[in-house]
């Protein structure tokens, strides 16, 4: 099969290779997917960079955890009727060496989720890490139905998914975005209110949120913990909660006593280590949102498999704001 891989960490132009590898064979409880589209997440780039200093987990890595395609073979213990099924997958390169940047990819059967008929493979390739992170972020503090949620960064990859899922789960959704162009993305995902923060001071942004809910919001999904934690504390109600999955610095300063006095719960989320049942529930919720009218994340650019270096550079340098995918077939 044609595939991309790296055998050392470093810049994409130095370490990524494209060539031929042997076709993988599904084992017990596994399916093989003929990949059509492979999604590139910031985490895939960070692994290739060795951004967290953990080194190379395997001698050879085919990158990317998320993808979409058609099941063409199954291993022992998997119903043969799954062959021919359109699917999106998650966790392909989570604690495993070979991800979706290849013509074929093998994953456990539960990690290959049926893709609704009217959803493209490109959209399917963008659902795994951001969608499951968003599901956990929206639900970690309890059922969001009837609650008010603030989604910080509602036009980002996780943000769009969080808005769509919170809306689908019948929460009242406030989304913050940086630019006027991002307002429509958050609205399209289902936000009830969108606050454009690019021209607002921190106090003005807080006033906008508290103008909607004077006693504070119930729960916040936070993409920039280091920057927003003080504002988050200000707009949270007593006993509120925060779910965060990203920070621009490894040791953010927090307003400890104000958070204590408000009895705020803070949940730190790493998608690779969510419980299996959480991932399965999240996948079902994502599909419900898609069949319920959500069009999925906005795709900014598509590259061929042989252009993986340029694709990684685009994600790494933030040249393209929306999702980046590889077209494998």
Image (cartoon, grey):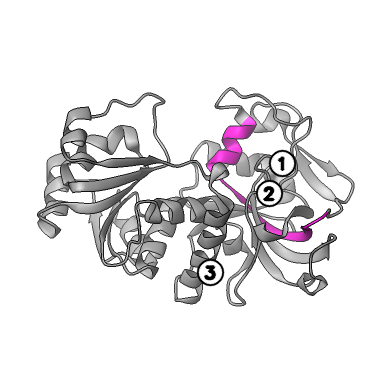
In the foreground, 23 or 195: 23
Q: Are marks 1 and 3 in contact (CB under 8 Å)?
A: no
Left or right, residue 155 beside residue 66: left
Per the rendered image, the range of residues in magenta is 28-48
Left or right, residue 8 beside residue 113: right
Residue 309 in the image: above or below residue 87: above
The residue under the point 48% across, 60% down is 297
Q: Secondary structure at mark 3?
A: helix
What's the CA distance linking mark 1 and mark 3?
A: 25 Å
Q: Earlier in the sequence, mark 3 or mark 2?
A: 2
Q: Is residue 163 visible?
A: yes
The disc at residue 180 is none
Residue 314 in the image: above or below residue 289: above
Residue 317 in the image: above or below residue 173: above
Residue 173 placement (x, y as % from top left): 28, 62
Residue at which label 1 appears: 96
Residue 81 placement (x, y as % from top left): 79, 75
The disc at residue 92 is 2
Residue at which label 3 appears: 287
In the foreground, 73 or 189: 73
């Amino acid at each position: 099969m044609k595939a991309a891989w790296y055998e050392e960490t470093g810049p994409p132009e130095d370490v990524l290779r494209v060539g031929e590898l042997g076709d993988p064979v599904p084992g017990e409880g596994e399916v093989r997917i003929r990949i059509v589209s492979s999604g590139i997440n910031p985490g895939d780039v960070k692994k290739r960079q060795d951004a967290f200093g953990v080194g190379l987990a395997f001698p050879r890595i085919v990158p990317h955890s998320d993808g979409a395609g058609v099941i063409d073979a199954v291993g022992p213990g998997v119903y043969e009727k799954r062959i021919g099924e359109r699917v999106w997958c998650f966790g392909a390169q989570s604690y495993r060496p070979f991800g979706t940047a290849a013509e074929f990819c093998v994953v456990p059967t539960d990690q290959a989720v049926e893709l609704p008929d009217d959803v493209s493979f490109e959209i399917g390739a963008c659902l795994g890490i951001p969608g499951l992170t968003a599901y956990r972020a929206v639900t970690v503090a309890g059922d969001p139905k009837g609650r008010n949620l603030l989604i910080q960064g509602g036009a980002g990859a996780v943000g769009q998914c969080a808005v769509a899922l919170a809306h689908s789960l019948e929460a009242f959704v406030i989304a913050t975005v940086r630019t006027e162009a991002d307002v429509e993305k958050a609205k399209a995902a289902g936000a009830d209110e969108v606050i454009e923060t690019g021209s607002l001071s921190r106090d003005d942004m807080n006033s906008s949120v508290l103008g909607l809910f004077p006693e504070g919001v119930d729960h916040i999904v936070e993409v920039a913990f280091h920057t927003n934690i003080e504002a988050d504390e200000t707009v949270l109600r007593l006993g509120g909660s925060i779910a965060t999955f990203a920070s621009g610095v490894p040791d953010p300063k927090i307003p400890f006593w104000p958070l204590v006095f408000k009895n705020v719960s803070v949940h730190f989320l790493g998608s690779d280590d969510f419980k299996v049942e959480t991932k399965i529930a999240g996948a079902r919720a994502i599909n419900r949102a898609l069949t319920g009218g959500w069009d999925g994340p906005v795709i900014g650019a598509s590259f061929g498999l042989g252009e993986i270096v340029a694709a990684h550079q685009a994600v790494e340098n933030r040249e393209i704001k929306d999702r980046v995918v590889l077209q494998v077939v």
